[in-house]
Amino acid sequence: MGNICLPETPLCVTQGDTETYNLAFTQDGTTALDLTDSTIEFVVIRSRSDPEADAVISKTITSFDDPTTGEAELELTSVDTNQSLGKYYYRLKIEFADGKVKTIMKGDFDVEWAK
C-alpha cells in the first residue's frame, strides 16, 4: 500500500449541526481500497498535543454497505458538534484487517457559530 494520506485538510462545522461525510478511499487514485474487516476511527482533540483518549469527538466505523468499494459514511450528530466555538484538531485513520494502521486525513477542525 502506497502513501494514501492527503495533505492536512481543514474541516469546519457549525455548532450543533448534523454533518455527514461520504468518504471514498482509493489505493492509487482509481482503485477502491478494500475496507473488509477494517476499522475507521475519527477523533477530534482540543490541541495537537492532547492524547486521543481525551477526544471531544470520537467515532468508530466498522460496518460498510459494501467494503470492497472503499466507501464509508461518517456522521457527526448535533451532540458531537455542540462543542465550544474555536479551533480543534482531527485525525481520521484506518486499521486494516492485517493490523496495519494508516492516518488518512488530519488537520484543523473549526467549530463556528451559525451566521
Image (cartoon, rainbow, N blue to C red):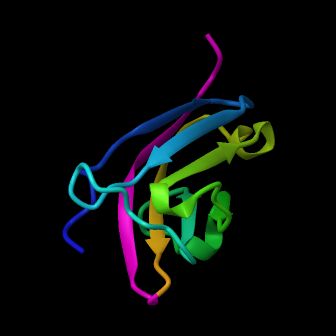
Asked if the stretch drawn in magenta spans residue 114, the answer is yes
* 1 in the magenta segment: no
Magenta range: 98-115
How far from the left and from the top, in percent, is residue 4? Answer: 26, 61
Q: Which residue is drawn at 48% across and 62% down?
A: 68
Foreground: 35 or 40? 35
Horizontal side of 79 relative to 105 (left or right) equals right
Residue closest to the eye, 65 or 112: 65
Looking at the image, which is closer to me, 9 or 72?
A: 72
Residue in the picture at 29% in, 49% down? 8
- Left or right relative to 103: residue 37: right
Whether residue 82 is situated above or below residue 114 in the rendered picture: below
Coordinates of residue 86 in the picture (x, y in percent)? 54, 37
Residue shown at the point (62%, 75%) measured from the top left? 53
Chief SS of the magenta region: strand
> Looking at the rendering, which quadrant does residue 104 occupy?
bottom left
Which percent across, then down, holds residue 95? 48, 77
Residue depicted at 36% across the width and 73% down the height: 102
- Where the N terminus falls, by quadrant? bottom left
In the orientation shown, which residue stands out farthest toward the bottom? 98
Instruction: Tell me: 43 left or right of 70.
Output: right
Q: Quadrant of residue 27?
A: bottom left
Please, which residue is most extreme toward the right here?
A: 79
Q: Where is residue 24 in the image (x, y as percent from the top left)?
A: 43, 48
Could you say which quadrant of the image residue 52 lies in?
A: bottom right
